[in-house]
Amino acid sequence: MSSAPVTDSLGRLIDALQCLPGVGRKTAQRISYHLLERNRDGAGRLAESLREAIERIDNCQCCRGFSETPVCRLCDDPSRDDSLLCVVESPVDIQIIEEIGYRGRYFVLMGRLSPLDGIGPEELGIELLSARVAGGTIQEVILATNPTVEGEATANFIHELLKKRQVRATRLAQGIPIGGELEYLDGNTLACAFNSRRVL
């Protein structure tokens, strides 16, 4: 099925939008046409914000999260608990964990182990994590990687590393969500809930 002819600039815009997660060609077309037909001011602000973010945001030298300064505001905060280190896959995970009131430190892997995609320990900054743990201040590392096959493999890899350093490693509990009902749970979720049960 042939698509409607587009200008070179519009074609490049549609192609560029497909870099976003979950955005295929049709969605990219809808976004492009919407911006050009109905919201050119919004498109200009979006372009300027993207350009500014790309130019100004880099990785924190300490936790590897996003920052506009060499050390981010969380790593620079002296009131945080230096004995706790939470390891996450992405900078967006920091924002989510901050909302529950966590007051420790962070380390961002910027991904998870995936040999088929060419992502190994080097790409995840495991040497930096190891050096940080070797400092002796950290007493507990919270492994908050996602409960996927790759996330579990990454957590297990880091756990083995921490055992050699004799640092306590904990994993986020998994199981039944608050307000959930057993009849709607899949087998893996229910099994995780049973395995993560605690004494009342």
Image: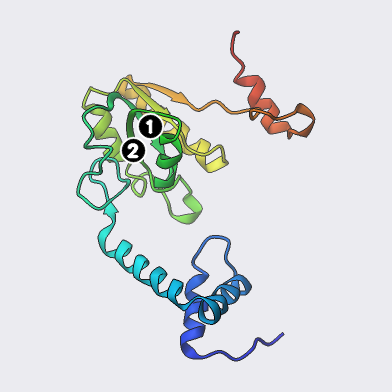
Neighbour tally class for label 1: few under 14, some 14-19, many 20 plus, Cα within 10 Å: many
Q: Compared to 27, does 199 lie above or below?
A: above
The residue located at (45%, 45%) in the rendering is: 112
Q: Image check: 180 left or right of 129?
A: right
**Of residues 71 and 127, which is closer to you in this image?**
71
Counting residues from the start of the chain, the first of labels 1 and 2 encountered is 1
The Cα–Cα distance between marks 1 and 2, rounded to whole angstroms, is: 6 Å
Q: Compared to 190, does 49 lie above or below?
A: below
Residue beneath label 1, please?
86
Amino acid tagged 2: Phe
Question: Picture coordinates of residue 66 (x, y %)?
Answer: 32, 50
Question: Picture coordinates of residue 25 (x, y %)?
Answer: 60, 74
Residue placed farthest to the top in the image?
200
Mark 1 touches mark 2? (CB < 8 Å): yes
**Of residues 86 and 54, which is closer to you in this image?**
54
Numbered label attached to residue 3: none
Neighbour tally class for label 2: few under 14, some 14-19, many 20 plus, Cα within 10 Å: many
Q: What kind of element bears circle 2?
A: strand
The residue located at (59%, 13%) in the rendering is: 198
Q: Compared to 107, does 116 lie above or below?
A: below
Residue beneath label 2, please?
107
The residue located at (50%, 37%) in the rendering is: 153
Q: What kind of element bears circle 1?
A: strand
**Of residues 76 and 60, which is closer to you in this image?**
76
Task: State the image quarter where residue 93 is shown.
Answer: top left
Q: Image check: 185 left or right of 195?
A: right
Quadrant location, the N terminus: bottom right
Quadrant location, the C terminus: top right
Amino acid tagged 1: Cys
